[in-house]
Image (cartoon, rainbow, N blue to C red):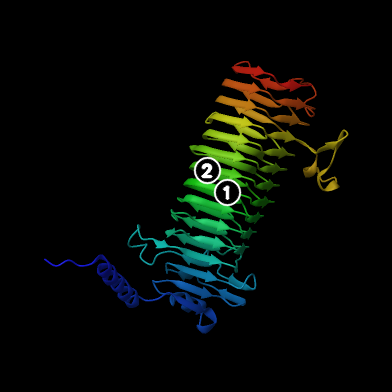
Amino acid sequence: MSLVRPSLLLACSLALVVRAQDAAPNPVDLDAADFSSLQAALDALPESGGILRLPPGTVEIREPLVLSSPESRIEGSGASTHIRNLNEEGKPALVIRPKTLDQDPKARLWRVQIGNFRISGNEKSGDGVFAEGIQEIFIHGLSVDHNGGHGIALVDCYEDPRIADSIITYNKKTGLFIDGCHDIVVNANHFEENQDALVCVDAFNLCMNGNNIDDHLGHGVVIENTYGSVVSGNMIEECNGTAIILDRDCYGITLSANVIAHDMGGGIDLRDAHGITVSANTFTLVHHFGVRVSENSGRIAISANHFGNSHIGEGQEKRVLEHENPVQLDIGHGIVLEDTRFITITGNQFTGLDGPAVRATGACVKILIDGNVATDLNRRTPDSKATFDLSPETKATLSDNLTD
């Protein structure tokens, strides 16, 4: 019996790999200017993928552009590359999904990237970007504005979606809508004057950091039926609704180091959430409540936050924007507990609030309020002197708090 040397086996294997690669189509580098239409350029991307470069200029569309090639990147020339959706039947500007998804619900595309161009619409158009069934989608440097639907909608883009350094503004529905995704990164984006900034439902592991969220007609961040997530280091200002909402069986989520300022509906609303940490946030000029814990929520740790008004030292309060608009009046609220249980409130500071530091209603049980500092409370409830206004049914331990 003859023996074949290992080096010869390796050489044969490499030769087979090279021949297989030669037989497969190569990824392409395309310029959209070489095609009769932008859709023709998208259709020219093969299954092996490639890059499609979009030149400067405005392309007006009335039907959705469709991208169905994996391993592909659509690269614009900055905001000068503008896709303008003129459709008034609720259709999206750009659809990214597998060709066979309607026949095979499990069909997926891998590693599709889009970036560095602008998509706009009108009040009657649909989403700016609608992506379904895309694994490892990456959206970077996109401008998405004035669409009649969501700015960006990701549906069943389960594996590792990433949205970074984009500006998502003036969309009639949600700026970024996420449904059924996993290991999500939303980083360093700017959201302004959408309905809600971000809605994340039926998902896992949202990592939302360093975003600027401003002037929304509805809420800031709405998370439902989602596990194991972190929302940190965001600026969430002047939402007509609530800054952050957790609802429908959320658990294992940390909300930390956010600035939550002048939100009309409230700060953080834990409607149906368990095992949540709320720490090191700044709540300033927030209406109705800084943190609310409802009867459907429990096992919450609230620590090292600041709840305050517009005090700037030496007994002064500063009107936001320094004018007399009544919406901008000095205001502040603390923590509201509603028939909840297993709550730790430690190491917070409460200053210049309209009412008490903590208000508990119903039969709240196993509440620990320890090591907090409070001053200048009950500014709009002069008949109340309570720092911690707890219902008779509430079972709480109070210790080592510094109050006026």
Classify 58 as above or below 105.
below
| 306 displayed left or right of 296 | right
| 154 displayed left or right of 361 | left
Residues under numbered marks 2 and 1 in contact, where contact means CB atoms less than 8 Å apart: yes
Residue extending farthest to the left is 1
The label number, if any, that marks residue 59 in the structure image? none
Question: Residue 343, can we see it?
Answer: yes
The label number, if any, that marks residue 208 in the structure image? 1
The label number, if any, that marks residue 229 in the structure image? 2
Q: Residue at x 23, y 67 (%)?
A: 5
Question: Residue 356, can we see it?
Answer: no
Image location (x, y in percent) of residue 141: 60, 63
Residue type at the position of mark 1:
Met
Classify 15 as above or below 264.
below
Residue type at the position of mark 2:
Ser
- The answer to which image quadrant residue 366 occupies is top right
Which quadrant, please, contains the N terminus?
bottom left
- Residues 306 and 63: in front is 306
Image location (x, y in percent) of residue 86: 58, 71
